[in-house]
């Protein structure tokens, strides 16, 4: 059995390998592609929600409508009358709820008032059976 080295064994060892093994490169690129395909939909996924639009609809004040105002100190006013306590407010709300047709109740809360006081007014309206309850705010751009 004879072993042949070509040109008597010289020159073959000095040649450089000219091919590159691209299999590891392709494997890494496929793994990165799969990772990006999985993570991009998760990063851009949002829950479809219909956000409210800001509208400025003028209030149609009718004679029977009630405006309840809460000032910065937490005092409650029925139209222009100061309510001495929560029982008096509940009594007036119960009377208003018994009317036919029932009046709309508009709540005007001061910007500086604690939410607790406005929340108590809303809860009293719910307990009394008021069906139409709205909040009065300043139109956009007219803060002052």
Image (spheres, rainbow, N blue to C red):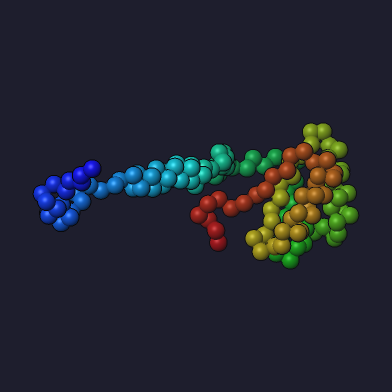
Residue at 79% across / 33% down in the picture? 101
Q: Nearer the viewer, residue 78 or 18?
A: 18
Q: Nearer the viewer, residue 124 or 46?
A: 46
User: Could you tell whether 125 is left or right of 36 in the image?
Assistant: right
Residue at 48% across / 42% down in the picture? 38
Could you tell me if residue 106 is visible in this image?
Answer: yes
Give residue 123's position: percent from left, percent from top. Answer: 80, 49
Give residue 121's position: percent from left, percent from top. Answer: 78, 52
Give residue 77's position: percent from left, percent from top. Answer: 77, 56
Toward the left, the furthest residue is 7
In the rendered image, the quadrant that contains the N terminus is top left
Would you identify the image quadrant in which residue 115 lies? Answer: bottom right
User: Could you tell whether 115 is left or right of 15 in the image?
Assistant: right
Query: Does residue 2 lie above or below 77 as drawn?
Result: above
Could you tell me if residue 79 is visible in this image?
Answer: no
Would you identify the image quadrant in which residue 87 lies? Answer: bottom right
């Amino acid at each position: 059995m004879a072993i042949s080295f070509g040109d008597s064994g010289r020159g073959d060892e000095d040649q450089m390998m000219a091919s590159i093994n691209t299999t590891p490169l392709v494997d890494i690129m496929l793994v990165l592609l799969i990772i990006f395909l999985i993570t991009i939909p998760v990063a851009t996924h949002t829950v479809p929600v219909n956000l409210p639009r800001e509208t400025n609809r003028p209030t149609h004040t009718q004679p029977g409508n009630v405006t309840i105002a809460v000032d910065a100190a937490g005092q409650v006013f029925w139209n222009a009358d100061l309510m001495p306590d929560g029982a008096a407010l509940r009594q007036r709300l119960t009377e208003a709820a018994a009317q036919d047709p029932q009046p709309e109740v508009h709540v005007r809360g001061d910007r500086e008032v604690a939410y607790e006081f406005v929340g108590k007014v809303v809860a009293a309206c719910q307990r009394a059976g008021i069906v139409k309850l709205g909040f009065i705010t300043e139109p956009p751009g007219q803060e002052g």
